[in-house]
Image (cartoon, helix red, strand yellow):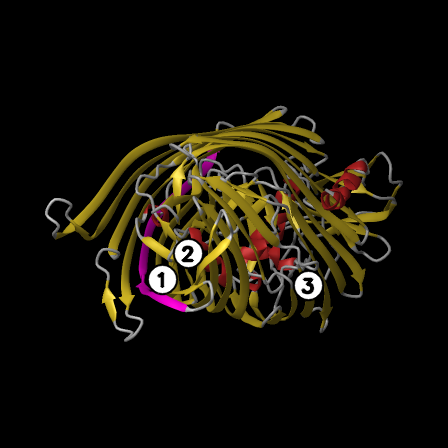
Amino acid sequence: MKKLILLALPLLLCAAIANAQQIKGNVKDDQGKALSGATVALKKVKDSALVKLAATNTSGEYSFTSITAGNYFVAVSYTGHVAKNSPAFEVSGTGDFTAPEVSLAKVSGQLKEVVVAARKPMVEVKADKTILNVEGSVNAVGQDALDLLRKSPGVVVDKDDNFTLSGKNGVQVYVDGRPTPLSGKDLSDYLRTLQSSSIEAIEIITNPSAKYEAAGNAGIINIRLKKNKSFGTNGSVNAGFNQGYTPKYNGGVSLNHRNKHVNLFGNYSYNDNTNENNINLNREVTDTLFEGKTKLTVDNKSHNFKAGMDYFLNKRSTIGVMANGSFSNMGMANYSHTDISYFPTKQLDRTLIADNTNDNKKDNVNGNINYRYADSTGHELNVDADYGAYRNKSNQYQPNDYFDAKGNYLYSNIYNMIAPTDIDLYSVKADYEQNFKKGRLGLGGKVSFVESSNYFDRYNVDPASGSQTLDIFRSNDFIYKENISAGYVNYNRQFKGFMIQAGLRVENTHNTGHSTGKRVDNNTGNIVDYDTTFTRDYTNLFPSGAITFNKNPMSQFSFTFSRRIDRPNYQDLNPFEFKLDDYTFRKGNTELRPQYTNSIGITHTYKYRLNTTLNYSHIKDIFAQLVDVTEKSKAFMTQKNLATQDIISLNISYPFQYKWYSIFANVNTYYSHYKADLGVDRKVNLDVVAATVFAQQTFRLGKGWTGEMSGFYTSPSIWQGTIKSRTIWSIDGGVSKTVLKGNGTFKASVSDIFRTLKWKGTSDFAGQHTIASGNFESRQLKLNFTYRFGNSQVKAARQRKTGLEEETKRAADSGGGMGGGSPK
């Protein structure tokens, strides 16, 4: 509790000083007409240091909140007009202040280049999402995407790398706005190949509109990879070194060339690391006690790339092509020791040593062709065609050696399991928007096809000769195909004092699973082929809506509703038995049904900064990972549908900046109730009140130095419906220094400073009591150097609206995030 109070304290302090001064103003052209979308920068008179950024609304008005006493001026720019500074003015620090009006004259002749550089806040909170700006973070250096998600606001990653968001499972992961077909271990392994140096931002979308796919009960996590938008030729190189138990290396290069006709971009990164994990698993079942200790060493070498081109056909139309992917070789060495005892007396009966290895090769390549049309009257069309190929190969060698209580060798069961998986994804989608009835109308559709081919061959290995024999009864093939066709309509409109958004999405799902293998006929005793096929076809409607009362911009209320779905993934449907050792294995469930979520919420935004959200969700047929029992003492993990989950959550976030110090703090609390009756000794009735706290602090120390401290705390909660977890928390710290006239940046950080990132969970199900715990190589010293070269200017004259203006306008619409930083 003390740790929770310490991490939550900055949020309480920030909320107490939310009533700082507000500066208002307006911008017009030389004809007296209001300019909408003009970029306004508040600067200090003393040194022209940037304090905050804003954009004017449709009335030409702008505002800055939480401004301390001092002397300031505003610098205003707008495409096609001459930039201008206001006269200097003084603010007292209390009450509201109106800045001098600024009038901009149109440009006569050719507009020269405009260069504006500003830091994005580490975390931004928008109406429907939270954005973690990885690119500018010191503590993100040397981490992969899975590490970053583990420390993101409201996100919990459990011991099996499953995600929950605000207490709900069913998180859909996107990369560059496109859903990945991977799930479970395949997804976590892929995220480990994405280094922070390749990631621009992580978007946590808790209230997706009808434009997004309906999958994702808890919401969507979109990982945006870097794409340079600067004109001219430019690029960067970076190199990093991490030291934990073992050394790790990473590096990359990025290149970009852009002119008025074409934008060429590409980047490449390499990662070489070895990580150690420790897992303890104790099980009590009937009269037997299993006490297992495992040390897992993962050696991962991965290559990531992204390349593409945007060709500007004219001022309205752009066509683009893009390809990205990763190639990973992942070797795993598992050193496992399990003592098997007679539980009543704790007398050791035998010991199982299962030291196994697994060679994994995971490759994926994605291609995209896109077209965008946008005119000055509000018509916008986006068309995307995508193809993805995922190729995973696994070769596991697993000896199970048994010894008696005195250490004498008894016997061995040795297996060699070869399991390749091929996934092919095809999709086409179109999104169209236009102004309609004083609002904005959007409609579109998508068709996607996924085919997953899974092959599993298990060989029994003779301990003496090493010869292998295919176990035809434990080997099989599983082919899974899924076709989803969807269409949607979405409309939003601003009325006097309130705004509405309503959408409806319809999705038809058709999937088939086809499993083949060998079995013994119970009547004849003969070996026969079996063919298990299931087919499902269903259509669902997914409404969503929101109404925002914004008559008083300083105090806005929003009410939201949505219905979403999570479909079983191919891994959870796959009936293969994947052995961890002789007594522990995983198995899919072909009877797994989709889970559905209905959510309602209310959000209050105070002075564009203090955001409070109360949400209620009811989940039907929720997925739960159960540790069940077979053959009296063997444990197998599988997914099943529980009856329901009810969850109430409260989320509070606040960004604050004062001079050289800034902080973003987020507190998420929830109550959840799980209920199911799956038979004798298979009942679930669990309640939990849990909280997560996230805080990120930044210190602008001057002369190019920046410090950063971040941390999170998660109270005891429930993982996957049946596992009770204990408290987990962590704190990271780091510094950065700009060198070489601002072209180079050196970063140094330490993750999990106090080495507290350790997990523990307990489960009581099917007459079995399980205690699992573990840790990984979480505390690391991380060093990184980045050098930028070439032209970094943005020519505003060549764009209808610059990227900075778009970012600024979005920030202004949501209160400016944490505000701007100082110039580079």
Instruction: Give the residues drawn in magenta, as a range.
Output: 409-435
Q: Are marks 2 and 1 in contact (CB under 8 Å)?
A: yes
Residue placed at 80% from the left, 60% from the top?
701
Numbered badge on residue 750: 3
Q: Nearer the viewer, residue 465 or 404?
A: 404
Does residue 313 show up? no
What is the secondary structure assignment of the residue under circle 1? Answer: strand
Q: CA distance from mark 1 to mark 3?
A: 33 Å
Instruction: Locate the N terminus by quadrant.
Output: top right
Q: Which residue is mark 2?
A: 186
Looking at this view, name the residue that lies furthest to the bottom. Answer: 465
Q: Are marks 1 and 3 in contact (CB under 8 Å)?
A: no
Q: Who comes first in sequence, dot 2 or dot 1?
A: 2
Q: Return the x and y of residue 547 as percentages of the image width and height.
A: 56, 26
Q: Who comes first in sequence, dot 2 or dot 3?
A: 2
Q: Return the x and y of residue 42 as percentages of the image width and height.
A: 77, 48
Give the side of residue 141 with respect to residue 643, left or right: right
